[in-house]
Image: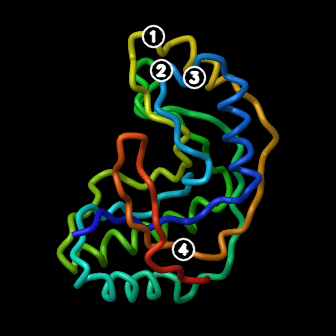
Amino acid sequence: MKRTFIAAPISDEVRELIRRIRLEIHGLENVVRLVKPEFAHITLKFIGDTSENDFESIVETIKRSLKNVSPFEVIIENTGVFPTPANPRVLWLGISEGISQLEKISNFLNREISKIGYPKEKRSFKGHITVGRVKNKHSSFSVVKKFLNFSYDPISFFVEKIIFYESVLRPDGAKYYPIYEIKI
């Protein structure tokens, strides 16, 4: 069994923004477990423990989800937290354009991969790029406030492929390895 998920990669410009956020928000690393910029992405479907026997079916499902899809533009232009600023657990960059295409792909994957035997995501799709996960809620208020007030110019890029990843959990954070890439 391998822990897997399906995601859209992000641009180098967005990775650079994440690096800048890490440097400019003093104290962020003390209260937030930060995502390494090279591993940032837009999750479309988290599968979890996956039998390697199902990989081929999953790849075929991804291909079907992209059947009538052309490369599309995504614009990143805000910051936010899940579930609420009063109880922050995840810090993220928000998507303002391209969200409907991402949601359509995500919903298709969620529905069709459940037919292979993997659980459906119960929550509705909320397209975002995770920047970090709060590890110390008690001392996070001022840092989260700085993150929410962090401003940047909108960043535009095109989603031209979807990647089926393996996620390996390590003490220094998760590492992601592409299993298969599907061009749009």
Q: Amino acid at mark 4?
A: Ile
Circle 3 Cα neighbour tier, 10 Å, few/some/many (<14 / 14–19 / ≥20): many
* Image depth: mark 4 or mark 3 in front: 3
Q: CA distance from mark 4 to mark 3?
A: 30 Å
- On screen, residue 58 versus residue 106, left or right, reads left
Residue sitting at x 60%, y 76%? 161
Q: What is the spatial separation of the Cα atoms under label 3 and label 1, in whole angstroms?
A: 10 Å
Three-letter amino acid code at disc 2? Val
Question: Would you call the spot at circle 1 few (<14 residues within 10 Å), some (14-19), or many (20 or more)?
Answer: few
Point out residue 173 in the picture as x, y percentages from the top left corner. 42, 43
Q: CA distance from mark 4 to mark 1?
A: 37 Å
Q: Which mark is residue 28?
A: 3
Q: Are marks 1 and 2 in contact (CB under 8 Å)?
A: yes
Query: Considering the image in quadrants, where does the N terminus appear?
Result: bottom left
Q: Earlier in the sequence, mark 1 or mark 2?
A: 2
At x 39% / y 89%, what residue is drawn? 60
Asked if residue 83 lies left or right of residue 48, the reply is: right
Sequence-first disc among 4 and 3: 3
For the residue marked with disc 1, what is the amino acid? Ser
Q: How many marks?
A: 4
In the current view of this chain or complex, which residue is farthest to the left? Answer: 117
Image check: 52 left or right of 29?
left
Q: Residues within 10 Å of mark 4 (few under 14, many from 20)?
A: many
Q: Are marks 2 and 3 in contact (CB under 8 Å)?
A: yes
